[in-house]
Amino acid sequence: MSVQQRESEPRGGFFRTRKGRHAAALGRPVVAALAVTLAVLVASTAAVYLAQGSDEPPPVPTARPATRVGAGVPQDWPAWGFTHTQNTVDAERGPAQALTDLSRTPVPQVTAIMGWGLDNPQPRPGEFDWASLDRRMEAIRRTGGTPVVTLCCGPDWMKGGPAGKTDWSKLEVAIEPEHFGDYARLAAEVAKRYGNVRYFTVWNEFKGFWNPSANRWDYEGYTKLYNEVYTALKRVRSDIRVGGPYMVMNSNAPGRKYGPPSELSGPWGTMDQRNLDAVRYWVKNKKGADFLAVDGHSMPVQREVRLDEFRALAKFSDVTRWLRGLAGDLPVWWAEWYVEPDASGWTDERRGAVHTAAMMEFVRGGAASALYWNPQTTTAANCPGCLWSGAAAGGGATPTLAMLQNFARWFPPGTPLVDVRSSDPSVRVLAQRGQMVTVNGTGRPVRTLIEGKALDLGPYEVKWIGR
């Protein structure tokens, strides 16, 4: 399949996930119908949960804030990194400077097996095409990154389509149950070919797994697929680490008028209980797992509601601690994360401050991984949030990549955290014994005291400071 065909992959959102320009290619067949009836569905869901009474799910004990980074995972765990998307780097397409800058401080790098710049790996039963995935894996190897594979998406012939053809508009149709075994065998072939890959997430955001008649996710179907893939991967190598369910953690704005009740809420709003139910079912019925993967946006699905972007970040630590309470010792893995409202008009400085503050929330909440979705373009010099500039601007690392690399360097798994505070609450601080990072969460200059020393920060300025 040509690059032009891959670039036609649709973008959009299910329950308005607010991913904007950072989005994975989305496009579920039920979106249009659900959009028309959204108000009715919200009202009916509210009635269901209000009527449940004692049948509501028991509350999950929220885990305490972390005292060390990713407690319980080994030091080589893939903690802070990014996901390759449609326009990325490799030896053929460059830009060469980005490859060099990525190599300076290697970080985990995630790739799907199909879509987002990658061809169909198995266009027909028994026929494999690894060329595009080989190129991406070589780029990860060349830059020293820890490779992570997202097992999404699937060949058309496993989804009811014809063999030998790829309809990219149907990229996110779910695998049909009779082909779950075929998909598990494809996953095993990926693991065999790329023997250096130890970390696999199964599917992505429950794509195609929606039960419209029940107004909820088809978590039974997803979990069956997951269990078959898990079994197949463990048969290849017992040291492979497998995780799911990669549920998108959507939330509604604060206030009952925006959504039904939920067992998890905060100043950022209220979680969609259906998503929590899906995670709960997977935790209870999975055959096994080495980590629990989710993704989400800090902002609510109601795009017209603009919360303070720094206040909304508490969602990441609150959700992480809820997941830790639910799943016990399973490491919590944020496969994607987003913070910017649509058409925000943010400056690069403001965006960088919010990104850095978000990473602080992941660390404090006890997340083991947070993997940034790279919204890369091919040539544009102005690419908000990208990890390297476009080829026309030289292709070098941006402050966003430098931020991820700094977290990888200074806050690797196992690092003990030190309680350091600012005299001005608008300045956020995250510290370990030898280093700290500070963020001015306002658009004005600030002078604050940290550990008895004065610190001046410009509007939305981020500073990394030795201790």
Image (cartoon, rainbow, N blue to C red):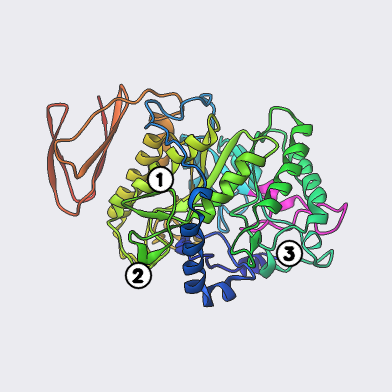
Marks 1 and 2, how far apart at CA: 21 Å
Front-most of 327 and 289? Answer: 327
Q: Earlier in the sequence, mark 1 or mark 2?
A: 2
Q: Circle 2 sits in a helix, a strand or a loop, which is it?
A: loop
Start-end of magenta stretch: 112-135
Image coordinates of residue 190 in percent, x first then y, are 75, 43
Which residue is identified by label 2?
304
Task: Identify the residue at image location x=36%, y=41%.
Answer: 361
Q: Nearer the viewer, mark 1 or mark 3?
A: 1
Q: CA distance from mark 1 to mark 3?
A: 38 Å
View extreme (bottom): residue: 36
Task: Say if residue 96 shows up in the picture.
Answer: no
Residue 454 image position (x, y, % from top left)? 11, 33
Rendered view: 333 above or below 3: above
The residue that label 1 is drawn on is: 316
**Is 366 on the left-hand or right-hand side of 165?**
left
Label 2 Cα neighbours within 10 Å, binned few <14 / some 14-19 / many ≥20:
few
**Quarter of image, res 290:** top right
Give the dominant element type of the magenta stretch: helix, strand or loop.
loop
Identify residue for label 3: 1
Question: Dividing the image into 4 quarters, which one contains the N terminus?
Answer: bottom right
